[in-house]
Amino acid sequence: MNGRDIYRAALAQMGEPLTSEADYEEDVVLGKLNIMLPNLFVVNNLMRETRGKERMENIPVLTSLDAEQIGYEDEIERTVLPFGLAAILLLDDEEDNKASFCNNKYYEAIRELQCVPKRAIEDVY
């Protein structure tokens, strides 16, 4: 998913039509996403390690909403990032109840995705 896909998913979480995209400055949305990505980097790498994938070396930085794919695991892109972005945008709109709900869903999704990589047990006897 790219930044625009996450933005549209966040609007859906907020109960906003896609026409609401014009209500938010793209630079602001882009900045908020770039602030969120480092917060999820460790969780993403834990998921990748658990799945036998290589860890990401660098935190992605989006240069536009449409340009590049973020490259995080699907669950983070489809659940965590949209809820987190929705919470931030709703706070900006002073919709505290909706923002609180989305923020809770954001942290709940992170907790559900955190996992310990499976490792072989070594017999020391």
Image: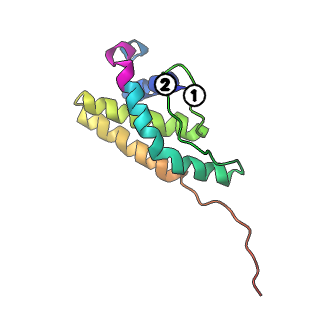
**Residue at point 49%, 45% (across, down):** 40
- Along the line of sight, which residue is nearer the eye, 2 or 75? 2
Residue 24 covered by magenta stretch: yes
Q: Position of residue 21 (x, y in %)?
A: 39, 16
Q: Is disc 2 placed on a helix, strand or loop?
A: loop
The quarter of the image holding the N terminus is top right
**Residue at point 30%, 36% (across, down):** 99
Q: Position of residue 14 (x, y in %)?
A: 37, 27
State which region is magenta.
21-28
Residue situated furthest bottom in the rendering: 125
Secondary structure mostly seen in the magenta stretch: helix
Residue wearing tag 2: 63
The quadrant in which residue 91 appears is top left
Residue wearing tag 1: 1
In the figure, 99 relative to 26: above or below?
below
Q: Is disc 1 placed on a helix, strand or loop?
A: loop
In the figure, 97 relative to 52: above or below?
above
Residue 75 covered by magenta stretch: no
- Along the line of sight, which residue is nearer the eye, 101 or 75? 75
Q: Exactly how many numbered labels are in the figure?
A: 2
Q: Residues within 10 Å of mark 1 (few under 14, many from 20)?
A: some
Which tag, 2 or 1, sits closer to the chain's start? 1
- Looking at the picture, which amino acid does disc 1 mark? Met
